[in-house]
Image (cartoon, rainbow, N blue to C red):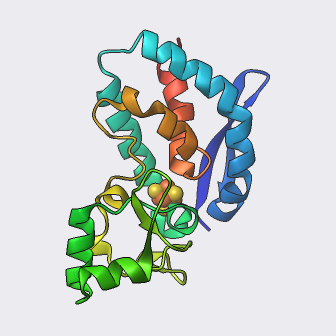
Amino acid sequence: MQKYIIFECLNCIFVDKLLSMDEFLKELPELAKEKLPESKKYFAKLKKRTPKNLDVVMQELHDNEFEKTDCLTCGNCCKTTSPIFTEKDILRIAKSLRMKVHQFISQYLIRDSDDFYVLKSSPCTFLDLNDNTCFIYDVRPKACKEYPHTNRRKFIQITDLTLKNTEICPAVFNIIETLKTKFQI
Ligand code: SF4
């Protein structure tokens, strides 16, 4: 079974711990909560003294992490959260499913508290729970395509969202813990 490396701080020394993806996902919410105060402080400092090459480093960390992490063994974002569906997403997906837009919306979507269209149910209706593949992968929402946003330009602007994602996405958790070792501020 493929093993994933996570970082645990023991007496301020980072050690590697090998876990299967399932084990990692079970531990993740607790681990992320434990790290949250430290991560919040870290990002607050990073915002005050943002390194010029932060986006370049984030891209590297993102690429390295996703060489190790196979989303098909996880699917946790699709099982626990909903993407936002933009108008363009809705038109594209409805067309590919040969549905009228209003049919697609009434069957699958609701408005959230910010008035964005999101999925009515979770896990995602379009997720195949047998193998974590997506039934609408080629036309999936932009938000799914870009998730978990750790390679986004101007990463410093989305640190709050990233902190939330440390509880959901094992890759984000690892990327942020590695970032802390890259820029020790
Ligand atoms: S993006 Fe993160 S949460 Fe989603 S499937 Fe990949 S590793 Fe899992």
Q: Position of residue 7 (x, y in %)?
A: 65, 37
In this rendering, position of residue 165 left or right of residue 55: right
Image height check: is 90 above or below 82?
below
Q: Is residue 147 left or right of residue 33?
A: left
Residue lying furthest bottom in this view? 98
- Compared with 34, 2 (above or below) is below
In the rendered image, the quadrant that contains the N terminus is bottom right
Reply above or below: 174 against 36: below
Residue 33 lies in quadrant: top right
Measuring from the top left, give residue 116's x and y in whole percent: 39, 57
Q: Horizontal and vertical percent for residue 30?
A: 75, 46
Report the residue at 54% width, 24% height from top.
Answer: 180
| Position of residue 149 in the picture relative to residue 80 (left or right) | left
Q: Is residue 35 above or below residue 128?
A: above
Which residue appears at 56% of the width and 63% of the height?
76
Give coordinates of residue 151: x percent, y percent: 34, 40
Q: Residue at x 36, y 45 (%)?
A: 63
- Please state the total of marks drawn on the protein image: 0
Observer able to see residue 58:
yes
Can residue 70 be seen in this snapshot?
Answer: no
Q: Nearer the viewer, residue 77 or 105?
A: 105
Pick whichever, 123 or 130, lies toward us.
123
